[in-house]
Image (cartoon, rainbow, N blue to C red):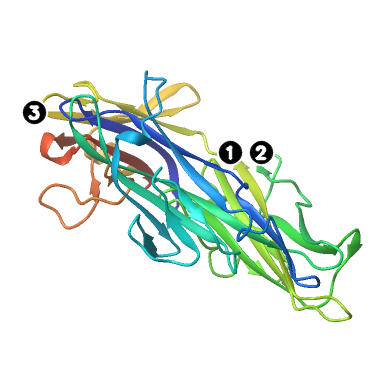
Amino acid sequence: MAITARNQITIVDLNDAKSVQVYFTASQGFSQGYNPDTNVYTPNYPTQNNTITPKVYESGDATEHLANCTNVVYTVNGTAITASTNNANYAVNAAKQLVIKGNLTTDLNVTFTADYIDADHITSKIGGSFAVIRNVTSGALFSVVLTCPKGNVFDKTVTGDLTVTAQCFRGSVADNAGNSFTWEQFDTATGAWKDVASGRANGATLTVKPADVLNFQTFRVRAHDNGGNGQSAADAQALVTFQDLTDPYTVELYCPTGDKIVNGTGQTTISARIWQSGTKIEDEATAAASRKFDYAWTKFDKEGKPQNWNGATSNVKTGNPITVLAAEVATKTTIVCEITKK
């Protein structure tokens, strides 16, 4: 059965937790243009290095704390770059910034990790990620535009499926020859793009079924033009988000013992309560034989990575309610609850 609704909660250990956020700035922006007709890169990174600066902040503190970070590592398309790395295209300077020195041959997916030492001398692992996009243009700009003939919202007026169609252009002229399309959807659980369900994509058209959309779902098309007729090969992409207004269920997560673990001891309990049109229709007190939903609780660590439940070989636990032990909360733990109608 398709997931009916979803919510999440973060449990924090006050013994060693600081709420730390990381975001990034780029001296030359987060994209680089390349024209294969003129072999020109804009900006040209060998002469205008792109310097990426992490900004590290604690909640309630206006001071920037990158200076309090050690063991800084940038992983660029799977390759770790540190201050001691000898690489012609990337470097980590004395200010702990990533310096991009070489022009892009592909998109860069970059992950930043570091050890952060707070004012209480507690060390925790922090991180973040960003992308630097390579935009290829040649002659007239190649682009792809998405249209939804019946709209992008499922509601009571919609019967059946919805579709989205991709149309390529060179400048303002439709380009209908030599194009291929790859359709993907964004997975909120992993933060990555994945292939759409089998049978949904048919060339330039994607069929979206109600079961594909849980509240909101973003899809991406990647278009490729083989070139020809004096034009070079090119790539472009576009996004579209569908909304489901027909799903009447809402998940409320109730934590009667609080969402904090103090000094690394104790435990807390999380319950799921299901609401429909302003009325609670099921909760942790509902007898098992009378329940209309199955409950799946997925656990992630402080870096957003899947983390197995204590004593288990999986990061998914079932039932309602659930108990979270202090041993399962290292700084903070995020738990996503998904319900599925039986």
Point out the tag, 3 or 2, that comes first from the N-terminus. 2
Residue 235 image offset from top left, x and y in percent: 70, 67
Label 2: which secondary element? loop
**In this rendering, does residue 296 appear at all?**
no
- The answer to whether 130 is drawn above or below residue 337 in the figure is below
- The answer to whether 11 is drawn above or below residue 74 in the figure is above
Residue at 14%, 24% in the rendered image: 262
Depth check: 74 or 323 in front? Answer: 74
Q: CA distance from mark 2 to mark 1?
A: 6 Å
Report the amino acid beneath label 3.
Gly
Judging by the rendered image, the residue that carries numbered circle 2 is: 156
Residue 190 image offset from top left, x and y in percent: 41, 52
- Residue reaching furthest right? 173
Q: Quadrant of residue 136?
A: bottom right
Judging by the rendered image, the residue that carries numbered circle 1 is: 246
Within 10 Å of disc 2 (Cα), the crowding (few <14, some 14-19, many 20+) is: few
Q: Are marks 1 and 3 in contact (CB under 8 Å)?
A: no
Judging by the rendered image, the residue that carries numbered circle 3 is: 266
Q: CA distance from mark 3 to mark 2?
A: 47 Å
Q: Are marks 3 and 2 in contact (CB under 8 Å)?
A: no
- The answer to whether 303 is drawn above or below residue 48 in the figure is above
Q: Say whether residue 208 is left or right of residue 316.
A: right
Report the amino acid beneath label 1.
Thr
Within 10 Å of disc 1 (Cα), the crowding (few <14, some 14-19, many 20+) is: some
